[in-house]
Image (cartoon, rainbow, N blue to C red):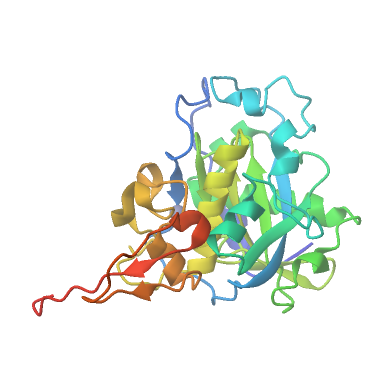
Amino acid sequence: MKRWVKWTALLGLGGIIVSGTLVSVRVPETTAGGFKCLMDTTRGGWSDMTHARTGVTRALVVFVRFSDDDSVGCCSQGWPDTLPISQLPAWADSFIDPPDAGSWTEGSLSHFFWQMSGGRFLLCGDLYESVVVPPHTYEYYETTFVNYEPTNSAINLDVLDILDADTSIHFSNYDTNPADGVVDAILLVYRRAPQMWPFGGWAALFTESATDCVTVDGSLHVDGRKSGSGAMFTGLNLFDARTVGAHEYTHLLLGKDHPGMQTDGHWNELDRFGLMPMGQDGGTSMSAFERLRLGWVEPEILSTTSFGVEIGDMLTTGDVYIVPILSSSV
Ligand SMILES: [Zn+2]
């Protein structure tokens, strides 16, 4: 793998040692619906919006576990600590559907986006055959780097090195929507990860502080910036991984230039009615507002002469109405 510019910046960060050791990591007592999302609020850094909101995007999905990750707790039964380090959890097969599946597994990321988009967009993909184990321990990454961005960058770049060395992976399979020389989506699902434990994710693979872009398979680019070629998130079971994964991938679809959106790309005011509030406040499905911004619903505008309107199940039917506010003061 060829690493591009700002390599020296990563090396510089890598030289910073934070004192202290990792003690007693416990699996949390809560499940998804409450998670944190790491977004940089101080820099722009969002790459050009190239993520397709229609058609079929094929993602490479990779489960990752550190060699020293034997944490246990209430929620780890979905990915038991007793599982051999390279063995995928049982639900991994249900996380994303292959492109030729023909139908989409209830609860999968594929089914989620298919349903939210009303059949306009499908995120399908391939599950990497075994769990990738980074070359260093959880404790190494956590104590070597300062905060989430250089930490996650270092880990994800190491994981990409492992994937690029595997000649069975054809990265061109993941550059189709559009086929522009930049990989569309690599989704890294961590059993746990430093800086985003218990539940959390990051809508980037690595960013300007490390390197902008790497090449895989000799010529294809992986864009590590926000809204680039993928995302990382933790997931101990299908529901949690699907929820956080959907949130992070929706960052890639949305960018951050929308009415009412915070500068970090979240709509906190949506609270539990939406997928894109930050962290603890978010829900597990998209609101009509979010779907409208993605172009996935076609709302009917009601008038004062509209009577007897029946509202169906918005999530499954896409039935969305706009009620105009008639007050001249609004
Ligand atoms: Zn977020």
Q: Quadrant of residue 141?
A: top right
The one nearer the camera, 215 or 288, is 288
Q: Quadrant of residue 64?
A: top right
Residue plotted at (48% across, 68% down): 254
Find the residue positioned furthest to the front. Answer: 308
Q: Quadrant of residue 169?
A: bottom right
Locate the C terminus and report the quarter of the image it occupies: bottom left
Asked if one can make out residue 206 in the rendered structure from this viewpoint, the answer is: no
**41 w.r.t. 175: above or below:** above
**Location of ligand 1 given as a quarter of the image:** bottom left
The one nearer the camera, 86 or 152, is 86
The one nearer the camera, 288 or 144, is 288
Asked if one can make out residue 118 in the rendered structure from this viewpoint, the answer is: yes
Q: Position of residue 83 (x, y in %)?
A: 75, 24
Residue plotted at (71% across, 58% down): 124
- Seen in the image, is 233 located left or right of residue 284? right
The one nearer the camera, 262 or 312, is 312
Q: Position of residue 327 (x, y in %)?
A: 11, 75
Find the residue positioned furthest to the right. Answer: 167
Q: Position of residue 256 (x, y in %)?
A: 42, 69
- Seen in the image, is 237 located left or right of residue 324? right
- Seen in the image, is 218 located left or right of residue 196? right
